[in-house]
Amino acid sequence: MTERFHITGNDQVTLFQRALRLKRYDDAGYVFEELDKPDLTHRIGFAEFTHLLAGPDMVLQRDFFSPGNLLREVKHGEAGALTRAQDDEQMTALWRKACVDAFYTLYLQQKVKRKDVWITPVEAELRFLAEDNFGRVYQEAKSRAGQRIEIPKFPKPRTLLTWVRNYENAGYHIDGLVSRYYACGNRHRRFNTEELALISRVVDLYASTQKPNKAKAVRRTISLFHDENACRKAEGHPELIVPSQRTVRRFLDRVSPYYLDVKRLGIDAANRKHIFRTSGLDVRMPLERVEVDENKLDVISLFATSGLLDLLPADRLETLEKGRRYLYLFKDCATKCVLSLRLAASQNAEDAIRGLKDVLRDKTAVAQAFGCTAPWHMRGRPFQIVADHGVAFTSAKFKLACERIGVGLEHPPVGQPALRGNVESIFLTLGHELMPHLIGRTFSNTKERGDYPAEYLASLTDDELIMTIVSYIVDIYHRTPHSGLGGETPLDAWERHNQANNIPTPPDGHELRAAFGRPFERTLNKSGITLFGIDYSCDELRDAYLHSPTRKVTVRADLDDLGWVSVSVGGQTVPARANEQIFSGMNYAEWQEIRRNIRQTHRANAEVHIEQIRRAYDRIDGEVRKAMLRNDCTPFYIKDEDVLRNERSMRLTIRKDEVDPDAPLENLISPPALPTNPLARGKRISTKPYTPDDPGTAPGTLSPKKRWGFNDD
């Protein structure tokens, strides 16, 4: 049933801070006009009006434009004087209302008139009616028989008539009977301009970086008055009135606390102290706002991977470098899901960009490599990324990466971490929930740390540290009810939006390679182009090889998928696929492991059959692949200089002729039995043994080098 309320032209409706007045209404709803712009009208349906009336965005003031309300505002400033009054003042107004009602009762019975001489004879009857009406308010209270009830004194005839006139002037509203004792007293200045100027000096004396207390600032202000009066007395001028310490103290207490803290503590400290706590931004859609931050972890770890520790002797473990790593974290504000985690050796743009790339890809395989049981499939294109003013996020590389994928980047003001409260809170959660369980914790400050030997107890490696953090986020944090989601878990919130098709689509492969791909310059050949020892080709490359005078092309490769690359040919970007299907979905780390296995039995630049690559790829077990994924989240990931160095170290020529299916496997690969420790595979280099006949072998001598001369053939 649709409710239709009675609204008149004397009522004012304030909707979203816009003053409206009823113009007309029909079967569809109400039609309001704006007071400032009468020609602008707004139609509000009956059901919508009922919904807005119960909310915080609408204020309905009945009889706002009536004459009685205008008179009430003249006396009391604005409507609602009763609600603003104290409890005792409200009871006083209620007693006055009872006296006025008693007067109207006898006035209608023609027993009294509006003159003092008519009120005195019936004063007893007026008092009885007023006390009977006012005393009913105590009937519902839990009181014992015989308990004393305090009844106010009945007014004099002239006072009663004054209350009647005030009640009528207020439009027969009780606001006209509210006392205004708070407005009594002398409201004029007691000091002249010069005296007020000296009193205001207390603000400058107190608002100092030396941080004096208020008592000292007040005493120095009083001394300024005495010094000024001494000069005036010597010159024959009238002295100034010296205020009391209480007066100066009250003047200082009326100054803005924020202004004083800005002067005493600094603007950043004042902003942190006076931050206004709210419920946060109204973010409803996933990836509508993604916050990112970098944090130096409160734990000392070993700058190595766990696999390397298994190969080093005990005496070498003590010499490993130790320290604190940085953690780059991206968090979605709508679902509270963590979209990316990356361990870094320092603050740098490269790790921030790699973290941004992880926001766009499915990380379930990474979570499984760390032993997680929950999925980590949260991904998509963010609408806006909010970061601080760190060197990693203000760098040109990070800004260009955001621009290439069409993501907005915002930097809130410095010194206000509450503007990035979502990502700041997750670091606090890690500090309170996870860090106490780690060995080598440094704590948040030296006082809290005490004598805890963090450096001596450090034993976690980089991959073990990031494994602990990822496991906590994926398996615990994402499955824990979150207060910011009304008790819903971040994983359930993401799935709820996923079922509603609210997840933004991530960039395609071409856009990803354009934004995050590694750029290379390659020369066209008969096979297309060769990158990482793999041949890539397409129709555009074949045409360019035949007809283009320029043989150099720009290639962008994604190291997570070597199956195809993006090539700039003739002013357009086209995909070039690998000539062999085996490279589809293979990442660069796996390809390097295959090349390392082949290098053990073949010399560099040797011809390698595709079947050898396929069988070597099959020999890479799951544990090795998991180790590759884990290392990619640490500072030991493959860098650009690593790719260039690997390309110079070995080149392969891949053949694809037919192979005898009956040929034994050892004829194709035949890897020798290798020791488990890769450090034992090298050759020991020793100095040449000393012989008396050869002076060059004497200790501390160098063998002479052969010099080139013009007479040499």
Image (cartoon, rainbow, N blue to C red):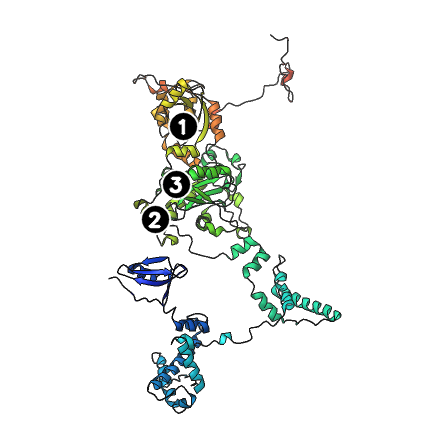
Q: Earlier in the sequence, mark 1 or mark 3?
A: 3
**Crowding near the residue tagged with mark 1, few <14, some 14–19, many ≥20 C-alpha atoms within 10 Å:** few
Q: Which mark is residue 493?
A: 2
Q: Residue at x 72, y 69 (%)?
A: 232
Task: Identify which amino acid the numbered label 2 is placed on.
Answer: Ala
**Where is residue 510 shown, x and y percent of the image?**
39, 32
**Where is residue 41 shown, x and y percent of the image?**
35, 58
Q: Are marks 1 and 2 in contact (CB under 8 Å)?
A: no
Residue assigned mark 3: 381
Closer-to-camera residue (249/636): 249
Q: Are marks 3 and 2 in contact (CB under 8 Å)?
A: no
Q: Which mark is residue 572?
A: 1
Helix or strand or loop: what does disc 3 sit on?
loop
**Image quadrant where residue 503 sits:** top left
Q: Residue at x 43, y 73 (%)?
A: 71
Q: Earlier in the sequence, mark 3 or mark 2?
A: 3
**Where is residue 19 shown, x and y percent of the image?**
40, 62
Position of residue 70 relative to residue 352, above or below, is below
Task: Identify which amino acid the numbered label 3 is placed on.
Answer: Arg
**Where is residue 165 shown, x and y percent of the image?**
42, 80
Between the residue at mark 3 and the residue at mark 2, the CA separation in whole angstroms equals 18 Å
Task: Identify which amino acid the numbered label 1 is placed on.
Answer: Gln
Closer-to-camera residue (433/138): 138
Position of residue 624 relative to residue 69, above or below, is above
Determine if residue 412 is in view. yes
Q: Earlier in the sequence, mark 1 or mark 2?
A: 2
